[in-house]
Amino acid sequence: MPSLQEEAEEHLLVVDAEEDGGEPENGPAIKFKIRDLIKESDSGQLILNGVSVDIPKGKIVGIIGPSGSGKSTFLRSLNRLWEPPVGTVFLDGRDICDLDVLKLRRKVGMLFQLPALFEGTVADNVRYGPQLRGIKLSDEQVYKLLTLADLDPSFYHKGSSELSVGQAQRVALARTLANQPEVLLLDEPTSALDPISTQNIEDVFVKLKNNGGMTMVMVSHSIKQIQRIADIVFLLVDGSVVEILNPHKLEEAKHPMAKRFLQLSS
Ligand SMILES: Nc1ncnc2c1ncn2[C@@H]1O[C@H](COP(=O)(O)OP(=O)(O)OP(=O)(O)O)[C@@H](O)[C@H]1O
């Protein structure tokens, strides 16, 4: 008999397939192509300076770089939390500026450093996204999503204000997963968590990738975390991706700022 965890993972794939009328040709995850992404601040300073990269399907991409190098801005350009210029960010070949923004954000979910839950119960939070589309998740579906996010189903009735930060982050993850995203954008998702909660949530990310084929783009200040879970690393310095690295060979970075950053953070 499959465990609740296995059933929950299966649920993620089944719902994807149902909604899309079958599994996409190249697997369940989608791919970003970013070309010459530039952002200037109001004072004309470059925040992103011509970033051009591909985000591979079904992989975890780690984004590292010094403070202020443009990591969050880059991440936010991928689901239009910051509107990128037309013709710079493509999702499976389509300019994301041509896509319906709410549909885009359902496909490309985001988790922030600090979880912002709504008032009400854990179940209310998990049901929120589908409810906006007129879909009421059954109790069983909510239990499965909680399990997928490594939370015991008994959290169902808990009030969102009763949770620890680590638990709230996992509820935020379950709420995001309720939208059946194909990509997760993670902006320092464990920086407010203790080491055990961090490990639990990292395990969830790895399972979502391995069993659900999910693509993830994760900003992290922890080089060790990047080495634990990322498949590929983009190093941002002054708004540019200056190196694309193997997480297990970060010491091979050649850019002088990159070397300094890596030395100081290891
Ligand atoms: N709307 C804005 N207007 C002006 N400057 C901005 C705006 N948004 C970000 N910046 C500036 O752009 C630079 C990059 O910001 P961003 O938050 O993307 O960097 P980051 O690498 O994520 O930094 P951190 O690691 O500190 O979170 C910073 O210098 C920031 O102050």
Image (spheres, grey):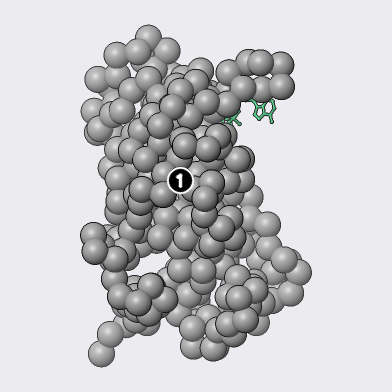
Is 58 in front, or is 147?
58
Q: Secondary structure at mark 1?
A: strand
- Amino acid under label 1? Asp
Is 47 in front, or is 158?
47
Q: Which image quarter holds the N terminus?
A: bottom left
List the single residue furthest toward the top. Answer: 256
Write the residue at 40% across / 60% down.
182
Looking at the rendering, which quadrant does residue 255 occupy? top left
Q: Quadrant of ligand 1?
A: top right
Looking at the rendering, which quadrant does residue 137 occupy? bottom right
Q: In the rendered image of this protein, does residue 241 appear above or below residue 248?
A: above
Residue density around tag 1, few if under 14, some if 14–19, many if 20 or more, within 10 Å: some
Is 231 in front, or is 263?
231
Write the residue at 60% across / 70% down.
129
Q: Which residue was labeled with disc 1?
A: 95
Write the residue at 40% across / 36% down.
34
Q: Which image quarter holds the C terminus?
A: top left
List the single residue furthest toward the right. Answer: 119
Q: Does residue 25 appear left or right of residue 182 in this picture?
A: left
Q: Position of residue 211 (x, y in %)?
A: 28, 66
